Image (cartoon, rainbow, N blue to C red):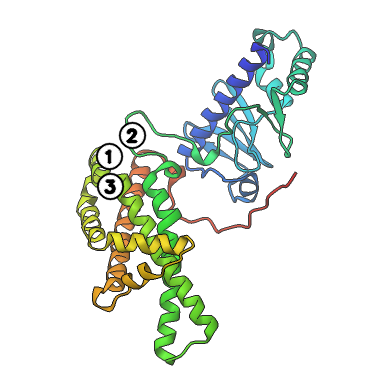
Amino acid sequence: MNKQLADLIGDYQEKVLEALILMQRSGIRMPDSSLRWIESDLPEKGLLDGDITYVKHGAGCTVYLPGGEIDFDFGIFGEINGFDLWRLSLFAGEKLSTYGFESEDALEGGFETAVSEGYLIRSNDGLFYVANVKRALAVDIDSRSPGDELPPRNLDIVMVLHSHYFQAAELMRENYESLNKKWKKDNSLSHGKIVDLRIYMSSWLGFLAVTCEGFEDIGMHVLLRSGRPAAFEKLIPKSDAVGKMIKRHRNPLRELRNKTFHLREDPEAIRRFFAPDARRLPWARELHDAFKDFFSAYRIQCEVHYAINGRRGELRIKREPPRRRTFMVS
């Protein structure tokens, strides 16, 4: 791809990112898909910070930045570095010649050549992407101000541990406890429900073990002290309490996890974990509750930090209702 076209695409993508950062800091939540954006209840027209106007349209938006308007569409999975010929031409405007193109026809010719030579790839939604370049996602936008030590919500490893692993443990525990309560009340369960009970319990403990491993691998005490804003140090006592609790039965829980998520020939590790005198199931409940308390405190502290530091698009005080996600298959 010739340098002139590459420069134009790069400048366009930088302006799109500038607009998106402004949108997020102004309180607009970044979508994880173009469908999510289309179905969002964001007003079609409004003002961002600095009295900058935005206009929502279809799968994208036009933002009237001080240096000129920028128009973009979100990709199918919320990509933000897609473009097309029309948007590049609109962005270049009267500066087209500064990019080395004498006319819009010349730009079109260069664009079509880049496509035919494989430098630009067309997506199913009509947007183009530079070949062999990672597609950036709206949910990963970093809108922090200089010196802000709290990572973007979607890239915060503690948030990842909570949402991808602990919440799985939480769901499995809820299902297990519900069936276990029914068993105690009725003094019986059908064979199918007994199987469900076993699956829920082993899955709960397995995901709890993964949460423990992630918690220790992160080095939560050090992270809170030196890898997060100073206000997060107040969470260290909760973190240390969880760490001490993990150590009581770390190895048996890890062995149980291995035998749960991998084909096992010997059930001995399972039997050891549930040995009556070990009382590991009450410990697992206690540990789970301690994790829940820690993650709740961490998330609250994040919400406070987002609000204070103008990161309003990352706030989750009001939850969006879940929507069915539609995938386009080529």
Label 1 and label 2: CA atoms lie apart by: 8 Å
Q: Is residue 111 above or below residue 236?
A: above
- Across and down, in percent, residue 19 comes to 54, 30
- Across and down, in percent, residue 218 comes to 32, 45
**Amino acid, disc 1:** Pro
Q: Within 10 Å of the Cα at label 2, are there few (<14), some (14-19), or many (20+) other Cα atoms?
A: few
Mark number for residue 229? 1
Q: Are marks 3 and 2 in contact (CB under 8 Å)?
A: no
Label 3 and label 2: CA atoms lie apart by: 19 Å
Going from N to C along the chain, the mark reached first, 1 or 2, is 2
Going from N to C along the chain, the mark reached first, 3 or 1, is 3
The answer to which image quadrant residue 91 occupies is top right
In the image, 210 versus 20, the foreground residue is: 210
Q: Is residue 30 above or below residue 127?
A: below
Give the residue at mark 2. Answer: 148
**Amino acid, disc 2:** Asp
From the viewer's perspective, tell me whether residue 116 is left or right of residue 270.
right
Q: Quadrant of the N terminus?
A: top right
**Amino acid, disc 3:** Met
Residue at image position (34%, 53%) is: 213
- Across and down, in percent, residue 222 comes to 24, 42
Going from N to C along the chain, the mark reached first, 3 or 2, is 2
Outermost bottom residue: 187
Residue at image position (28%, 59%) is: 250
Q: Within 10 Å of the Cα at label 3, are there few (<14), some (14-19), or many (20+) other Cα atoms?
A: many
From the viewer's perspective, tell me whether residue 258 is left or right of residue 239.
right
Q: Is residue 56 above or below residue 93?
A: below
Label 3 and label 1: CA atoms lie apart by: 14 Å
Q: Is residue 170 above or below residue 219?
A: below
Mark number for residue 220? 3
